[in-house]
Amino acid sequence: MSTRFSGSFTQQEPIPEEGIEAAMAVLRSGRLHRYNTATDELAETALLEQEFAALVGAKYCLAVASGGYAMATALRAVGVKPGDRVLTNAFTLAPVPGAIAAVGAVPVFVGVTPQLVIDLEDLAAKTGQAEVLLLSHMRGHLADMEALMAICDSAGVTVIEDCAHTMGASWKAVPSGTQGRVGCYSCQSYKHVNSGEGGLFVTDDAQVAARAVILSGSYMLYERHLAAPPAEAFDAVRYETPNISGRMDNLRAAILRPQLRNLASQCARWNERYFAIEAGLRDTPGLTVIERPAEESFVGSSIQFLLEGWETEAVEAVLTGCLKRGVELKWFGGAEPVGFTSRYDSWRYVQAPRMPQSDAVLAGIVDMRVPLTFSLEDCALISGIIKAEVGAVYQEVQGS
Ligand SMILES: *Cc1c(COP(=O)(O)O)cnc(C)c1O
C-alpha cells in the first residue's frame, strides 16, 4: 500500500472575511495602539477583553502580546518573587518553564500520567515546596480539576492555568481557565484563535487584575478598559507595580473578535476531525489511544497516542515510515528536543532530578497536529497510514 498524504500540517484556515475587514478599518484609522482612540471610540482591544471575559464567565480580562507574556504576568501579579519555587508540569511546552524563569523563579517539575495529565499524587507530595502551581493543560488534556483544586486549596497553593490548548474546553462544564486564580491563553497561529501572536489573561481577583493591567503597560489609562476592575482597585497598585510592556494592539484584537464568535463551531469541527482520526487508530496492536474522561470537554486541535515500551529504533521506524507518506508525527521520547518536543530534561537551566515514571510515559508519546484545513477524508487517510506503519513495525519487532 503506497497511499500518501499531501496536505500541510502547519496550514491554518484564513482569517474570516469579517476579521480582514475589521483589520482594514483599524489600518485605515491609523489608531493601532490600544490607548489611541478617538473621542467616544471603544478600542478593539478593550472590546475583545470584554467579549472574552463574557465568553468564559470571568470578571476581568486583559489582552497581551503572547501566551508566554500572560503567564509571566500572572506569576508577577500573584506575587512570585525571584528565587521562589513554582510547581509546573514535566510535560509541557518551553514557554511554561520559560515564564517561571522570566520572573527569576525556579521551576519544580511535577510528573505526567499515561493519560497525559499532571500526576496528582506527585503534586500532593510536592505542594510543600512552592506556593504557586503553573498548571499546563498540555495538548488540551485536563486533569481532574476538582481533585486538583482540592489538593492545591488545602495546601494553600495558588493555581495559574496555562490554557494554550484549552480555549473552548471545560471540566464538568466549567470553562478551562476559570478554576485557578488566573487563566492564560495564547492566540498564536497554532492555537484555537489566530492573530499570529497574542495572549489573553482572565481572573476574578480585582487586585491581581489591576496589577496585570499596570504590568502590561497601561500608562495609567486603565479607566479605558472595559473588563478591568473599578478605579479603586488601582489605588495602591498603580504606584507599586512596574510597567513591563506587553500590550495587545487593536489590529490583532480586530481579527480575533470574529474568531471568538465562531469559537464553539470551530471547536466542534476540530473534534469531528479528532474523533475521525481516533476511530482510525483504535485497535492498532502496539498503539494505545488516550481515553478521554467523560467530565472533560476538550478541543481536538492535536492528537496524541502512546507507543508504550517501544525501543527507540522501532519508534523512529514508525516516524520515518509515516513521514515518507506525508504524515508528520512528533515524538517526545527522542534524546534531543526537535521543534516543539522539548521536555523537563531539555531545560538545563533548571536543576531537575530524574523522574523515571514520567520518563517512561514521555518515551512513548507521539503527537500530531490536526489543523482545520484537513477534511474528514484526509483524517481517514492519515489514520490509515499511521495504523499501517505502526502495524508493520510492531509485527516485525514481535517476530524478531
Ligand atoms: C503555545 C503554548 C503556550 C504559549 O505560547 P506563546 O507562543 O507564548 O503564545 C503556552 N503553553 C503551551 C502548552 C503552549 O503550547
Image (cartoon, grey):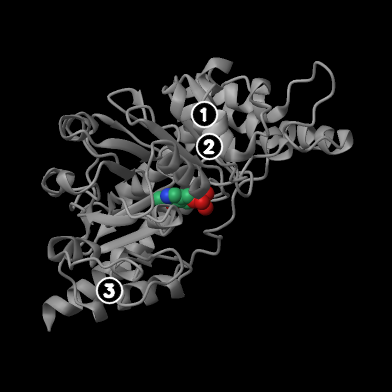
Regarding mark 1 in the picture, which secondary structure is present there? Answer: helix
Identify the image quadrant of the C terminus.
bottom left
Would residue 370 be seen by someone viewing this image from the given angle?
no
Q: Where residue 315 sits: x, y (%)?
A: 27, 73
Quarter-wise, where is residue 30 in the image? top right
Image quadrant assignment for residue 121: top left
- Where residue 50 appears, as percent x and y from the top left, is 59, 21
Figure check: 123 above or below 221: below
Horizontally, residue 187 falls left or right of residue 123, namely: right
**Front position in the image: 96 or 280:** 96
Instruction: Give the residue number, with chain letter if any, for mark 3.
Output: 315
Q: Which residue is mark 1?
A: 237
Disc 2 marks a residue whose amino acid type is: Thr
In primary-sequence order, the first of circles 1 and 3 is 1
The residue that appears at 65% across and 20% down in the rendered structure is 223
Q: Are marks 2 and 1 in contact (CB under 8 Å)?
A: yes
Residue nearest the observer in this picture, 340 or 94? 94
Q: Which mark is residue 241?
A: 2
- Disc 3 residue type (three-letter): Val
Q: Are marks 1 and 3 in contact (CB under 8 Å)?
A: no
Q: Is the residue marked by circle 2 packed among few (<14), some (14-19), or many (20+) residues within 10 Å?
A: some
Q: Between residue 348 and residue 161, name the one nearer to us.
A: 348
Crowding at label 1, few (<14), some or many (≥20) Cα neighbours within 10 Å? some
> Relative to 5, is 81 above or below?
above
Q: Which residue is found at the position 84% from the left and 39% from the top?
A: 27
Q: Residues under labels 2 and 1: Cα distance?
A: 6 Å
**Which amino acid does the dot numbered 1 rest on?**
Val
Q: Judge by depth and name the residue closer to the eye, 88 or 11.
A: 88
